[in-house]
C-alpha cells in the first residue's frame, strides 16, 4: 500500500503543536502571586470601608398617614368642672351622641327634657293648619339657667295661644250673631208679609175714599162721611208706613249683624295669626338658645366612632376652653 503524503504532514503539525501548547498554557508565577495579593487588598479595602461606612438598620423619615375617617378632636368650649360623663373611654359612640356636660347654672336634665318636648311639638308649631298643641307640664322647668328667660317668653306665648283656642271667643260670638241674624231674618219675613197686607188695606181704603169723594161732590153724602173715610185712609197709610219703617230697620239690623260677623271673623284671623307668629318666634328663639347652651356646655360626638380620652378625665375635674 502506498502511504498518503498529506497525512504525514498533518502528523508533523500535531507533533509540533504540543510544545507550543505547553509554553502557551503555562501561567507565569509572578502573575499568580500579584493577582492573589491584589485580590486580598481589594477584599481588605471593602471590609475596612464597610466598617467606617455602615448602612443604618433604621432610617428616620417623616411619613403622612392618610385615612378615610381621620380622628376628630373634641374640646371644651367653656371652662368649668365636668358635671357628668355619659360615656366610657373606648366606647363606641354615634354622631351627635352626648359625651359629657360641663357644670353650669342650668339643670341639664330639665334642658334635655324640654328639648325633647319641643321636638315633639315642632310639627304643630310649624304647621299653619294645626289648631291644637300637645299638653305638657310647664311647671317642671324652673332651673334652666340662661335659658329661663327665653322659656318664660315661650310659655307666655304658648298659654296665650292655648287660651285663645280653648276660649274660642270669636267663633262663639260669631255663632251667637248668626243665630240673631237668623231670627231677624224670620222677623223680617213676618214684617214683609205684614207690610204687604197693610199696603193692600191702604190701597183699598184709598179707593173707598175716592168713591166717597165723588159721592160728596155729587151731594150724595155729607161732608162728615167724607172726613171719616179720609181719616181711615190716613190711619191705614200710617200703619203701612210704620210697617215699611219696621221692615227697613230690621234689614239694617241684619246688615249690622252681618258686618259684626265679618269683623269678628277678621279679628279672629288677625289674633290667631298674631298669636301663632308670637308662638313660632318664641319657639325658634328658645330652640336657638338651647343650641347655644349645648355648644357651650354639652360635649357631643362630631362623628360616629370610638371615643378615646387623650388623658385621664373624671367628674368634678376642672377643664378649660380648648381642652
Image (tube, rainbow, N blue to C red):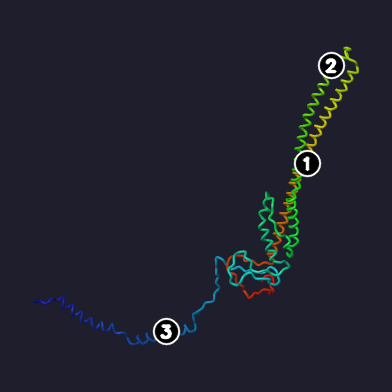
Query: Where's residue 56, x and y in %?
Result: 50, 79
Query: Where's residue 172, x and y in %?
Result: 75, 45
Please tell me whether mark 2 or mark 3 is closer to you in this view: 2
Question: Counting residues from the N terminus, which is met first, the one under dot 2 or under dot 3?
Answer: 3
Front residue of 219 and 145: 219
* x 73%, y 61%: residue: 139
Question: Counting residues from the N terminus, which is met first, the one under dot 3 or under dot 1?
Answer: 3
Where does the N terminus fall, quadrant-wise?
A: bottom left
Instruction: Estimate how packed mark 1 is, as few (under 14), some (14 to 19) or many (20 or more) residues with alpha carbons within 10 Å.
Output: some
Per the image, label 1 sits on a secondary structure element best described as: helix
Q: Which residue is mark 2?
A: 211
| Residue 43 numbered tag | 3
Query: Where's residue 128, x and y in %?
Result: 68, 50
Asked whether, in this view, residue 63 is left or right of residue 127, the answer is left
Which image quadrant for residue 81?
Answer: bottom right
Asked whether, in this view, residue 298 is left or right of residue 38, the answer is right
Question: Counting residues from the N terminus, which is met first, the one under dot 2 or under dot 1?
Answer: 2
Q: Which residue is mark 1?
A: 260
Amino acid at each position: 500500500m502506498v502511504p498518503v503524503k498529506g497525512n504525514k504532514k498533518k502528523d508533523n503539525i500535531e507533533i509540533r503543536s504540543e510544545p507550543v501548547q505547553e509554553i502557551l498554557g503555562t501561567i507565569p508565577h509572578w502573575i499568580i502571586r500579584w493577582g492573589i495579593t491584589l485580590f486580598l487588598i481589594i477584599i481588605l479595602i471593602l471590609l475596612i470601608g464597610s466598617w467606617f461606612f455602615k448602612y443604618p438598620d433604621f432610617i428616620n423619615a417623616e411619613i403622612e398617614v392618610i385615612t378615610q375617617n381621620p380622628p376628630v378632636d373634641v374640646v371644651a368650649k367653656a371652662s368649668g368642672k365636668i358635671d357628668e360623663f355619659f360615656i366610657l373611654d373606648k366606647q363606641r359612640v354615634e354622631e351627635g351622641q352626648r359625651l359629657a356636660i360641663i357644670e353650669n347654672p342650668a339643670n341639664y336634665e330639665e334642658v334635655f327634657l324640654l328639648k325633647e318636648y319641643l321636638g315633639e311639638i315642632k310639627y304643630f308649631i310649624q304647621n299653619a293648619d294645626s289648631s291644637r298643641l300637645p299638653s305638657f307640664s310647664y311647671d317642671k322647668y324652673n332651673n334652666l339657667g340662661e335659658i329661663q328667660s327665653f322659656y318664660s317668653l315661650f310659655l307666655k306665648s304658648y298659654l296665650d295661644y292655648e287660651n285663645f283656642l280653648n276660649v274660642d271667643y270669636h267663633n262663639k260670638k260669631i255663632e251667637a250673631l248668626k243665630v240673631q241674624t237668623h231670627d231677624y231674618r224670620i222677623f223680617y219675613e213676618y214684617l214683609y208679609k205684614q207690610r204687604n197686607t197693610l199696603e193692600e188695606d191702604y190701597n183699598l181704603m184709598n179707593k173707598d175714599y175716592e168713591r166717597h169723594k165723588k159721592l160728596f161732590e155729587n151731594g150724595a153724602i155729607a161732608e162728615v162721611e167724607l172726613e171719616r173715610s179720609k181719616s181711615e185712609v190716613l190711619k191705614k197709610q200710617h200703619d203701612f208706613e210704620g210697617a215699611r219703617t219696621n221692615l227697613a230697620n230690621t234689614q239694617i239690623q241684619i246688615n249690622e249683624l252681618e258686618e259684626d260677623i265679618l269683623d269678628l271673623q277678621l279679628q279672629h284671623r288677625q289674633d290667631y295669626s298674631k298669636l301663632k307668629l308670637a308662638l313660632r318666634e318664641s319657639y325658634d328663639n328658645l330652640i336657638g338658645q338651647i343650641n347655644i347652651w349645648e355648644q357651650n356646655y354639652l360635649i357631643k360626638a362630631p362623628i360616629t366612632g370610638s371615643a378615646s380620652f387623650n388623658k385621664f378625665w373624671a367628674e368634678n375635674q376642672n377643664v378649660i376652653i380648648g381642652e
